[in-house]
Amino acid sequence: MKIAVLPGDGIGTEIVAEAVKVLQALELPLELEYAPVGGAAFEASGHPLPEATLKLAREADAVLFGAVGDWKYDTLERALRPEQAILGLRKHLGLFANFRPAICYEQLVGASSLKPELVAGLDILIIRELTGDIYFGQPRGRRVATDGHFPGAEEAFDTMRYSRPEIERIAHVAFQAARKRNKKVTSVDKANVLETFQLWKDVVTEVGQQYPDVTLEHMYVDNAAMQLVKAPKKFDVIVTGNMFGDILSDEASMLTGSIGMLPSASLNAKSQGLYEPSHGSAPDIAGQGIANPLATILSAAMMLRFSLNQPEAAERIETAVKQVLAQGLRTPDIWSAGTTKVGTAQMGDAVVRALG
Ligand code: NAD
Ligand code: IPM
Ligand code: MN
């Protein structure tokens, strides 16, 4: 089983090193091949997603990805910025279905910014469409306005768009996932304002008729943002577009204690997958050895389950993570009084030990 390992920038290298430690400790026949991506690749070769990196990702059974980005690239032309690497991988590999499970582990109930009773036992799944929406819609650019409030002024524009088949396939993914869970799908849209999301709502409703055993509700995104912090346990599966899913998943991460706890899997129609934490390269803490590696380690578990057909190994990792939390080990982002503060590598080592 060949895994393309793309650590990237900032804390990406630190957290991926810990996930690799854990994978290697499983003693499975895994072949890991590393390649540069993001700012690191730009420095080395002048492009954030070099052809060789893309080729490796295409040919691997799965991709383990860290994070990309740094403030110092914010003035580069867009095509050369580190973020284009992850957007390019999603697009070129067709990774349209992004799973972001937000699970609040018992031991971290107190680490959430919400009251313990709101998050205790929380287990929701955000399914974010990942290759469409305003992220990829054309045209986009800058121009001189010929109409609007300020004709003659410089303006910028992006295009929000979804086609029926794009909505159909992500809706099927959501209903099928809900069937294996609590059989409820909340489709999050902005159909009251946007035509793109009226089509979204119509198509999700139609697809839902094929899943009579699953309850479907629709919710506007502004209300969903509020409900997520009011009563998050009322959700089971949330399905939404690329941009709303980006925002709501960062919000949901705090229900679990920290953005450092939120893993993700991005799958294509062939169930090839890219696995990465939901957070970014965290330049504010990079190089300090304090980043939480658990989101990446849990992403590696998702990789074993979804792409490598190793559900037992996945479960071993998830159980080990619960054990180290039960031992009271905490990186600073999830630390609270009475627990033991550890760094990135100590946390990774503890997970390896807990694998037994
Ligand atoms: P971020 O997710 O990198 O960081 C947000 C905050 O969360 C920071 O305070 C950071 O220290 C903290 N944080 C994130 N991960 C953590 C972890 N594992 N442990 C402890 N704390 C953690 O978001 P940002 O600061 O808005 O973006 C930084 C860079 O990352 C930008 O260039 C952005 O474009 C990029 N980014 C990349 C990805 C990706 O590669 N998929 C995702 C999000 C952001
Ligand atoms: C994420 C990130 C990316 C996104 C950026 C870095 C392109 O925020 O994976 O959530 O917006 O999708
Ligand atoms: Mn994001």
Image (spheres, rainbow, N blue to C red):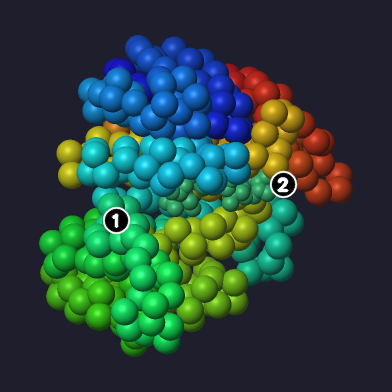
- Left or right: 219 with respect to 66? left
Q: Which residue is at 42% across, 17% downward?
A: 34
Q: Is residue 177 above or below residue 342?
A: below
- In the rendered image, residue 1, in percent from the top left (x then y), is placed at 29, 18
Q: Are marks 1 and 2 in contact (CB under 8 Å)?
A: no
x and y percent of residue 320 in the render? 58, 31
Using the image as rendered, state which of residue 297 and residue 87 is in the foreground.
87
Q: Nearer the viewer, residue 144 or 348?
A: 144
SS label for mark 1:
loop
Residue 154 visible: yes
Residue at figure coordinates x 63%, y 69% from the top left: 118
Circle 2 residue: 334
Q: Nearer the viewer, mark 1 or mark 2?
A: 1
Q: Which residue is at a point 29% across and 56% down the rendered structure image?
A: 136
Q: Amino acid at mark 1?
A: Phe
Which quarter shows the C terminus? top right
Q: Residue furthest front?
A: 152
Looking at the image, tell me whether mark 1 or mark 2 is earlier in sequence order: 1
Residue type pointed to by label 2: Ile
Q: Secondary structure at mark 2?
A: helix
Q: Which residue is mark 1?
A: 136
CA separation in Å, label 1 and label 2: 34 Å
Q: Is mark 1 within 8 Å of ligand 2?
A: no
